[in-house]
Image (cartoon, rainbow, N blue to C red):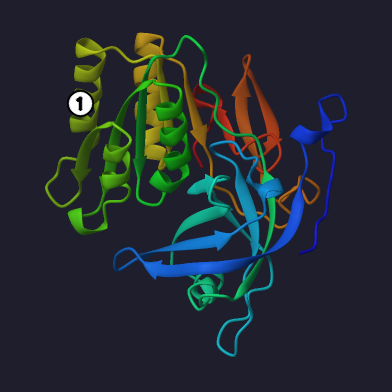
């Protein structure tokens, strides 16, 4: 096991800001459905001091068929210090994820992390709403687990193209969440229906905070609802990255803050940002 340690913010306790480069052993790498796979790694305790919403930079294997060049940023699906496990849920779409899909039990995978700033659950936020689509639900899974640990009330609206690729539904239910599923297939995922579902939640149980990771369509909808009802929120953003530690500036994108446009790095200042500050791209 090799370890690279970096103190990112000297003004804060150094143990809270360590980055490790570690060779982990693959426990399993199995299909979840026709598009997604669940990768489970044996991981040392030091890399499992994570926050919901953080990510790792994965060094995808090189094969005769796939030669990915850069590391791939991957949201954490689950981290379990008690079991010494680190989980990633991913969709096989290109060179890097296709290479990841070739990993077998007992293979090694080099990971760099944990990276970035994660989600917050403020002490006075009791009723939480999670809204996400597709693999974006993987990013919110650790947040749902943390909400359960803190005894918060959780509603999860899970969206997908069709029912056969809905993600994390059973997992969220196992954590006690009220789960609402919507799909393109039956037309329930359209913006107006989502707005109505969320308005019903606000009227019936109240919502103290909104969390999401998803499309511009979801972003705009949730920003509108948040402004209308004065509900704070956070969003985890996806962006192409090269280094993952803030040096290459590859992942810079604009945000609106205090009436001004500011540029920030998704890998370093994020990937979690204030919902109202995010600008769609």
Query: Residue 225, how many percent across, how many down?
Result: 34, 19
Image quadrant where residue 264 sits: top right
Residue 252 vs 107, above or below: the answer is: above
Front residue (pair 48, 167): 48
In the displayed structure image, the side of residue 100 where residue 220 appears, left or right? left
Q: Secondary structure at mark 1?
A: helix
In which quadrant is the N terminus drawn? bottom right
Residue 175 vs 58, above or below: the answer is: above
Image quadrant where residue 92 sits: bottom left
Tell me, yes or no, if residue 93 can be seen here: no
Total numbered labels placed on residues in the image: 1
Front residue (pair 83, 247): 83
Q: Residue furthest front?
A: 82
Front residue (pair 170, 212): 170
Q: Residues within 10 Å of mark 1 (few under 14, many from 20)?
A: some
Q: Residue at x 14, y 44 (%)?
A: 187
Image quadrant where residue 125 sits: top left
Query: Residue 189, how many percent across, how many down?
Result: 21, 41
Residue 15 vs 127, above or below: the answer is: below
Q: Residue at x 51, y 67 (%)?
A: 27
Query: Residue 47, how many percent across, how many down?
Result: 68, 48
Front residue (pair 278, 164): 164
In the displayed structure image, the side of residue 90 where residue 108 appears, left or right? right
Q: Residue furthest bottom?
A: 64
Q: Report the residue marked by disc 1.
A: 197
Tell me, yes or no, if residue 184 can be seen here: yes
Q: Residue at x 62, y 40 (%)?
A: 50
Query: Residue 86, how many percent across, how many down?
Result: 55, 53
């Amino acid at each position: 096991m090799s370890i690279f340690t970096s103190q990112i913010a000297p003004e804060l306790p150094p143990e809270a800001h360590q980055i490790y480069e570690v060779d982990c052993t693959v426990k399993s790498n199995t299909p979840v459905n026709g598009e997604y796979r669940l990768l489970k790694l044996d991981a040392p305790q030091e890399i499992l001091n994570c926050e919901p919403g953080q990510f790792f930079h994965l060094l995808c294997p090189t094969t005769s068929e796939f030669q990915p060049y850069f590391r791939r940023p991957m949201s954490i699906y689950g981290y379990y210090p008690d079991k010494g496990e680190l989980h990633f849920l991913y969709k096989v779409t290109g060179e890097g994820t296709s290479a990841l899909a070739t990993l077998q039990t007992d293979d090694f995978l080099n990971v760099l992390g944990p990276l970035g700033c994660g989600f917050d659950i403020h002490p006075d936020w009791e009723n939480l709403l999670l809204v996400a689509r597709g693999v974006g639900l993987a990013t919110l899974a650790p947040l749902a687990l943390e909400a359960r640990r803190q005894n918060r009330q959780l509603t999860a609206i899970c969206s997908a193209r069709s029912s056969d690729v809905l993600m994390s539904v059973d997992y969220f239910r196992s954590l006690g969440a009220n789960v609402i599923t919507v799909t393109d297939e039956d037309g329930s995922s359209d913006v107006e229906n989502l707005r109505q579902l969320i308005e019903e939640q606000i009227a019936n149980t109240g919502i103290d905070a909104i969390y999401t990771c998803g499309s511009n369509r979801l972003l705009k909808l949730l920003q509108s609802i948040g402004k209308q009802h004065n509900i704070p929120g956070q969003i985890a953003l996806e962006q192409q990255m090269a280094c993952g530690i803030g040096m290459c500036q590859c992942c810079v994108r604009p945000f609106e803050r205090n009436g001004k446009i500011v540029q920030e790095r998704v890998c370093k200042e994020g990937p979690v940002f204030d919902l109202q500050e995010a600008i769609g791209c």
